[in-house]
Amino acid sequence: MRSRVTLRLALVLAAGVGLLAQAWLPRRAHTRTPVPRPPLPALEASYTLPPLPEASPRIANYEIDARLDAAARRIDGTLVLTWRNTSGVPLRTFPFHLYWNAFRNDLSSSARGPRRRPLTPPYSEEERDRRRGYTHVRSVRLLGASEADLTPTLRFVQPDDGNADDRTVMEVRTPAPVAPGETVRFGIDWTSQIPYGDRGRAGWVHDYHFIVQWFPKIGVFWNGAWNCHQFHTNTEFFADFGTYDVKLTLPDGFVVGATGTLQGEPARNPDGSRTFRFRQDDVHDFAWTASRRFVERRGRFDDPGYPPVDVRLLVQPEHTHLADRYIAATKIALRTYGAWSAPYPYGHVTVVDPAWRSASGGMEYPTLLTGGTHVVAPFVLHSPENVTIHETGHQFWYGLVANNEFEEAWLDEGLNTYHTAKAVDWALGPVGWGRRYFGPVLEGSRRGWPVVAPGVRLGRGESRLEGLRANGKTDVMARRGWEYRTATSYTLNSYGKPALTLQTLEGLVGEEAMTRILRTYARRFRFGHPTTRDFIATVDDVTGQDYGWFFEETFFSSNLCDYAVSVETGRPRILEGFADGPGGAPVPARAPRPEAGATEGGDFESTVTVLRIGEVRLPVEVLVEFGDAHTVLESWDGEDRWTRFRYLRAGPVVRAVVDPARKIALDVDPSNNSWVEETGRARRAARKWAARWMFWLQNLLELHAILG
């Protein structure tokens, strides 16, 4: 055990030295060369695309008035929900999410979930108490001509698991049904206790408050039934679009950021507090943040052809030197995602740099997102660039398309992860690879220690293959978020595998067709709630082909994809036996053996064998190169377990590669995709890379020996 701990410490120290060296080397040493960028698709397409809707259906509209008691860590609020029945059927029962009741005690479904650690020692009683949170609904009223007190009808329901101790969904019942097309208004008074924010997505750390999923929010009537799932650690959210008009009253001195735009100057109240009013049309949630430590920076995205966007950054004082990089990364996402889907329609976005120890980093809400970085952040780590591009990208899928993330997380997270890698590759290039190894430095930390492997370059998507190899068979990808066997399986099947699947689809249909697919999908379902079947139908519609087979092999399968190649090349053939004599009669014959190395007078017979080791069947290309500089590109449908290609040429096969263009990003083992004739040059290259690896390993072991 001591040896393992010491080795871990050695690795951490080595990583720290590397980071400090990169951060404080002379500026000239890590000045970036501008990355040559290929042109993005023109915003004005030459093909017909669905029109973009001017507004959302605005089914759920909220007026909220809330006050923060910063000392007591409490929010007292009232809201008026104006809800329109678009279901086509009369409704009397209405469910609401009370997400913060997940932190009420250790009996909630979230507390029992696979990613939740119980609040047991080494936590003290005080530490356990401050991590508690709840939403207590004081009253629910039906407003309007048929005003009624609905509080006596309030009950808690558990539609997912029947856990009677879970209070994250409440339900109320109206005296009479709400008819189709009718609008109903609910008045709700509630109090929320804010949990400490080092474990969940919301909460406070020091004077930093990140307030999300914080008010009673109505479910979605969808596909003929109410869709209002409990809070699970492995799921995100789902809600209808509407207009939010929110007043937030806070003690003086707080800098506040929120969904929407600030309506005028904050009002000063007699008790010294200030009231901020934010408003936003056509969003499906409202989030806000407040801290006295925020430093505000501003930028503006104003590229030709795009709607202009004001970028507001709220950054921690220790990260102000990264402000320009935060804003630049936001612009990269607005530019690339806008070209690949549809331009961002809101005139503003707020980027939040979360406080140290807050678990709110890397989250997305309408027009507001959180990043995350380190004080020492050399550019080679692509931090804060990676997370900022990713979370800004969510504005296009989670924010504007709004699929059901409880049930089909991959439809947002996968699309966004696919696009993040594409945007980073386009804008930043393969500068290096920042990877978090060896687990978190501190137990409970969401951030591991960043280690840069010098000289390592990975292609787009390759970093996710390790997880797919290790856990790809655990679950079918198409599964509701809380039903995956492990948290690791949820992450893989929501992020990595769908991103690799979409990259593979791009390889099969071509980049231009993939852009048409995603542009069509983004426009066809803006302000909608599409499903995976809707996405597949869009693929079929744009390509004019049936791609159901592809998604059956990937989305609806837990099988792995793996191709391999081997080559056998015979010596020049010598005729020994009988040949055609006069009149075709067989006569004994034997051709002379050519000199060593000569190819004249005989041919090489080569056999290239391609194996489908994995279960996934996808069409694949095979590149074959010969010693006489001739090349052949073969195609194989991948249906059988293997196929062979035989060649008779003057030169032998010197190289064979399965999927030379790396179209099949799902191939879990690229190392067996190529075969190269072992020549002196190849042996020298192998020795060179082995020596380089041994150099780094030797230094690491020496450091370990010193510390041991």
Image (cartoon, rainbow, N blue to C red):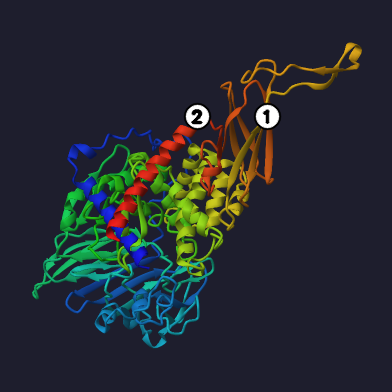
Residue in front for this viewpoint, 680 or 585: 680
Residue at (31, 66) in percent of width and height: 445
Q: Is residue 588 above or below residue 608?
A: above
Quarter containing the N terminus: bottom left
Say if residue 369 shows up in the picture.
Answer: no
Indicate the amino acid at tag 2. Gly
Which mark's residue is nearer the viewer, 1 or 2? 2
Residue in front for this viewpoint, 27 or 356: 27
Label 1 sits on a secondary structure element that is: loop
Quarter containing the C terminus: bottom left
Q: Position of residue 263 (x, y in %)?
A: 20, 60
Q: Position of residue 305 (x, y in %)?
A: 32, 38
Quadrant of the image occupied by residue 694: top left
- Badge 2 is on which residue? 680
- Badge 1 is on which residue? 570
Label disc, if present, on residue 313 of the rendered structure: none
Is residue 575 toward the left or the right of residue 329 in the image?
right
